Amino acid sequence: RKLGRNEAFAAVFALHPVLLLESAHGGHVDAAGIFLALLAFERALSKRWFGSFAAAVLMGWVKLWPFAIMPAMIRRRGPLRTLGLTGTVVLATLGVFYGERSSLWTYVRSWEFHGPLAWSLARAFDGYAARGILIAAFLIAAIATYARDRHRRAPDAGTVFALILAYLGCSPTVYPWYAMWLAPFAILCRSVSGLSFTLLTVVSYAVLERFDRTGIWREDPRLMLVSYGVPLAVLTFETLRRKGRATSAPVNPSMGLEIQNSDKKSLETHIQK
């Protein structure tokens, strides 16, 4: 409502089949994190900065990687202070909740699932080099996104959407419940390609069927062509359609006449003076 969207779009998210599958059936806590992300976003829209900050911190405690979108929620103090505050919270969280023996470090070093960029890089470079390239790519994308919106003080759904999309594109691990973080912001941005991606990630579950049948855990990379290729095709169509609308937008012929008349009057006034 605050963004001028039809409230019926909320039902699209509430009834999203993957959200229902992963929360009600799968029991993943990402649903709680997504709620806190939306709460932080809404509080920031209302300029309730402390509430936005508190919700964003709790969001990161549910799942660590969404701290990447925290600066987009609490940008009241300017970009450098915002990034500094976020970095302080992340370091404190790592120090308190994640020790040397935490499974987080195993996850960061070696986990891989349904990420086509990571899959391709892992076959071209050794593991650490591939991870380094992915981290660098995400940091570049995040910095570019924040730099583009550095003068903005209110949160922007498009910025959050772009950051989550950048993370998912650079992440070695893309489970369907990770993609669910994209869904509410895809709805706010009216992105059909984003929504199609959140739906098509379920094809990755084919690995479970093979594992139950053969006892071998191995992904079929051809399935990534479906879950990533179709949304990319839709995104291309959306982009071309948007550009087509922009170039074919009707021009009011009276507008030029009004401008000419305005310039003529200004010139006459100047001469009289």
Image (tube, rainbow, N blue to C red):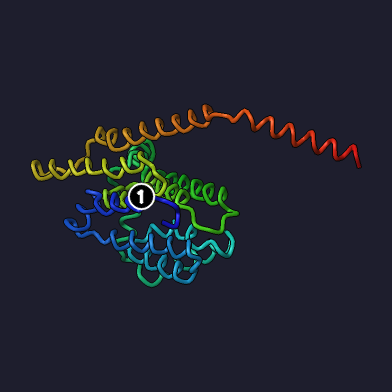
Q: Residue furthest left?
A: 213
Whether residue 265 is visible: yes
Q: Which residue is mark 1?
A: 182
Q: Tell me what residue is drawn at x 14 percent, y 43 percent.
A: 216
Q: Position of residue 2 (x, y in %)?
A: 44, 57
Q: Position of residue 160 (x, y in %)?
A: 44, 52
Q: Secondary structure at mark 1?
A: helix
Q: Tell me what residue is drawn at x 27 percent, y 54 percent.
A: 14
Whether residue 109 is visible: no
Residue 228 sits above or below residue 14 on the image = above
The image quadrant where one finds the C terminus is top right
Residue 26 sits above or below residue 213 on the image = below
Residue 28, picture quadrant = bottom left
Circle 1: residue type: Leu
Q: Tell me what residue is drawn at x 32 percent, y 51 percent.
A: 8
Residue 76 or residue 217, whichever sits in front: 76
Q: Tell me what residue is drawn at x 54 percent, y 64 percent.
A: 84
Residue 195, picture quadrant = top left
Would residue 71 appear left or right of 187 to someone viewing this image?
Answer: right
Rate crowding at label 1 as few (under 14), some (14 to 19) or many (20 or more) other CA atoms within 10 Å. many
Would residue 235 appear left or right of 269 to someone viewing this image?
Answer: left
Numbered marks: total: 1
Residue 204 sits above or below residue 185 on the image = above
Q: Position of residue 260 (x, y in %)?
A: 73, 31
Q: Position of residue 48 (x, y in %)?
A: 48, 69
Residue 2 or residue 55, whichever sits in front: 2
Residue 223 or residue 122, whichever sits in front: 223
The image quadrant where one finds the N terminus is bottom left
